[in-house]
Amino acid sequence: MKNFSKTVLLSAVIILLCVNFVKADDFTDAIMKAKKNLQASMNTYDEKALLKVRGEFERILQLKKNEWIVTYYLALIDYTIASSAMGGENSDKDKVKKYTESGFGNLEKSILVRDDFADSYILRYALSFNRWIYESDKMNDIIAQSEEAKTKSEKLESDNPRLSLMDGISTYYMPEMFGGGAKNAVPILEKSVELFAKRVEKEAYYPDWGKDMAYGFLVLAYIKRDDDGDKKKAAELFSKAATELPDSSFLKGFVKKELDKNGK
Amino acid sequence: MKIILLFFFAAVFSTVYSQQDSLKTTSVVKGTVKNKSGKFLENVNVVIEGTIDGTSTDEKGYYEFETGKTGKRVIIFSAVDFGEKKMDVDIEPGSVFVLDVTLSNTEFKTDEINVTASSFTSGENSRVTLSPLEITRIPGADADLYRAITTFPGSNQVDEGSRIAVRGGDPSEVLTFLDGASLYNPFLFSDNYNTSSYSTVNPWGMKGINFSSGGFSAKYGNVLSAVLDLQSYDIPQTKGMFAIIGLANAGLSGVYKTKDNKFGATFSAGQFFIKPMLAINNDNTDFSPTPTASNFGGTLAYKTSHTGLLKYYMNYSYDDMGVRSTGPSYDGYYSGKTKNFFTNLKYSFAPTDVSLLNTSVSLSTYNRTDKYGIINTISNSIYGKVRTDFGTPVSEKVDISTGMEYEYNDYKANGTAPMYFYNLREDAPFFTLDNLDKTGRAGVYLETKYKISDNFLVQGGVRSDYYTLTKKTVIDPRLSVVLRITQHSFLKAATGVYHQNPGLVYFLQGNTTDLKPEQAVHYIIGYEYNRDNDFILRIESYYKDYSNLVSNSINYYDYTSDGKGYAKGMDVFLKVRLKPKFNGWVSYSYVDSKRTPYDGADKISSDYDITHTLSLVSEYNISDYLTVGATYRVSTGKPYTPVIGSVYDPSQNAYIPLYAQRNSARFPAYTRIDVNAQYIFALFGRFAVAFAALNNLLNTKNLYEYNYNFDYSRKIAVSSSNIRTIYFGMGLQL
């Protein structure tokens, strides 16, 4: 009789666990589905598609309040929308500010729950660059914020390719006199491309964005540096990237245009 | 056994039952989302709370989704620039549930109203009017906060220096507030003959700068016209040092913080030397000694707890100069020397999640020596203050703040002063000064900020001050309102009663304790349009009604509190920023300021009745590294009192001037154009900036004063010492 009681109790526990496992699986499935949609919308930089997938993540948040990976993805979408609104001289400052601040807010929620995820600090590092657009007066504050985020991510995961990518992009745009420029960006971006090639994310639902940007910016840096053989390297790298990542509008559009214009 | 079985079935059934939602007949939820003005909103997220069921609105604001989650539910509507709106619903299984939603302004996240009448801000505030970078770049402002403020409407420079007079008032009616302490003499070369003053406040060291030229809050006591409220940085954000060297000065500043962000320190030190600048600019002004000044200051900040912060601030400055001045009775060097020390210890912490308590103790000393002929005076002022402020919201709509302070001031004067004002020769008759007077002031205030709606804010308060020397108590009610008309435009109005004790020097010279606190009643109304600081338009008109002003009695020997006056006018400010190339503003002021010169007299122009003032400031970024700028200022000449004759006094062998009615004439109009340029580059791999300025480009001979020959028969125009001056230098990050 005693054994029967134990069996009944064990069965109850197993059934409960199974049901909850199914629920957790729903959650993971939902994230994976949304992540796939995000990848597609990041490939095209289509704001409407990005906002649509943003809604998906917001709804997933209803399943698990304050889930750090969901708020991370919300911040990543905010960053992507803000970055695409920069567009040089015609930048939409209001939009950059709105989504950058929203990105910071979502990222803080994510870090509050999980503070050892390197990609969160890399994203914070990236978001802090956007502040130049609408808070250029706060130079010291922005530098301090980006340095702090960079240092933290280096400590957590120094071989994260997205960290080298952000470093490379910031070096690429920084004036040469301050240690920036294409020449200095090339080795950093090469490192990023190498790291991406070896990279296997620990979990399928972890972020894996940035590979096309690493390829693309390295192509741009080669073209701009223009040392002996650089243009050939740029063309070869672009060809490889386009084969590997055929859906990237960044590669197919911006980088290809630059390659056609100045890469020959 | 029964219990175990019961538990088993309950667990299984409850779990399985909870999965049945999806097996039930699904319902359709659909509708539209629009804003208050009827515009359909795209990309609003719609979701049933606690579920993943939902969708986003399309470009027509339409949404539709299927759900098995029926019964009593909550649907959430949200978007990045909208707040979250929750709607209670009851969805019947198998039904089509229609829900149209309007997100009204209450859901729209707008900036908090933080616009107040007559206020200009800088620092971290989201609605700053002028950033520290802009302050340092204004041509002619010489990176000086106070000089920068004079490019705003309503304020004028005193002798082209950093001291300012606001809306027709006297310079003494402007109070500088730093971390809750009163900062009385933050200037070098203040009140020296034909020498422009410089401020000792470093704009980069301030996280918040708020300048109010009227209608300010009840937290500020003992000030009649304007307040410059400064908040220094707490823990610095970074570490580093910056050195600067120029043709007339050198400086070193630095910031430090510990890794755990619990302790931070800042310092700045500067030395002023103008010989190289005089030589390069061929300036032959007869100085002895050549002006020199030193300045040292810094902060120490320590986080005592999560919300507690102990901060110490100190600043010391010293200046010394002499300049030749030829007057009717004496030809020699005017010599001025000051030593100024200010220190403040502030502790702040949050007693609750939403309240803040600040307590500060400050002490400052000001020592001044003046010599010219028989004039040889040393004055010492000591100011001490203890202050506590507490602020907390009492509801979502109401904030209250309250505080109290006690301030001590003593003034001591020693030396020799001329017996006859028209005879300043070194051997002239004199009397000896050895006076000391002191006073205290206890103040208390209570203020409420009531957010009637997101678009309407009322701030009302009252303060009371008791002056120990005169044993007089004043009560000052104050009120300001702001109405948001659109997202970017506001109507503002303010009124209030303001009191300020006359300077102790009047009590000493008049040998009296019977002077009342001077009084001004402000009335201000204005309009502001501010689109993210890229486009700002402000128009304000004001009226200041003065009474109890210190005034000469009819015999000119005594002081009374019978002076009356007014200042009325209009300020217009237009700022345009066309990023990334252009930034500029235009400010215009009209003022009519009159006061009674002595008891019973008609009102006449006050000393700073400068009718029209126009400033144009612009800066242009030629490239990412090179910026050029220009400032043009023009204003009506300042009033002065001409001499219309003289009488010989054989006993003094000097002439007694006979004056026309006070302030009955005006200097010629004042004009000045300044230009400057900054170039950013790398030096030894470090950030560096080179700068050059050309002040008074056209070398306009603006007037400092009229002097006279020995018998006052010939008027001699004395030009301002601010001739065309080239200045250059560079800064380097270390």
Image (spheres, grey):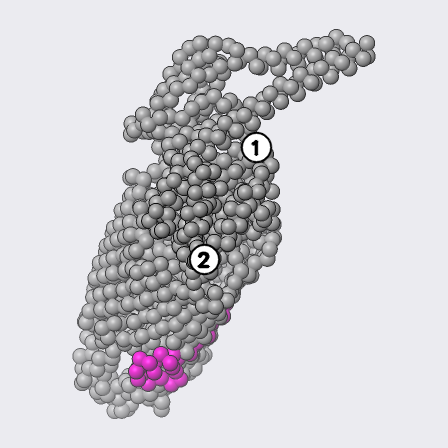
Which residue is at the front of the view, B364 or B53?
Answer: B53
Residue lying furthest right: A2
- Residue A235 appearing in the image: yes
**Residue in view at x 54 percent, y 30 percent:** A65
Q: Which residue is mark 1?
A: A204
The Cα–Cα distance between marks 1 and 2, rounded to whole angstroms, is 35 Å
Q: Which residue is mark 2?
A: A183
Numbered tag placed on residue B48 in the rendering: none
**Residue in view at x 33 percent, y 81 percent:** B280
Quarter where residue B158 is shown: bottom left
Nearer-N-terminus badge (1/2): 2
Same chain? Circles 1 and 2: yes
In reply to whether residue B277 is colored magenta, the answer given is yes
The local crowd at label 2, few if under 14, some if 14 to 19, many if 20 or more residues have their Cα within 10 Å, is some
On the rendered image, what quadrant is the N terminus of chain B found in? top right
Q: Is residue B182 above or below residue B5?
A: below
Q: Is residue A107 above or below residue B155?
A: above
Residues shaded magenta: B274-297
Q: Is residue B87 above or below residue B348?
A: above
Q: Position of residue B26 (x, y in %)?
A: 46, 12
In reply to whether residue B46 is colored magenta, the answer given is no
Is residue B203 rendered to the left or right of residue A1? left
Which residue is at the front of the view, B565 or B36?
Answer: B36
Task: Give the chain of mark 2.
Answer: A
Q: Which kind of residue does numbered mark 1 sit on? A: Ala
Secondary structure at numbered mark 2: helix
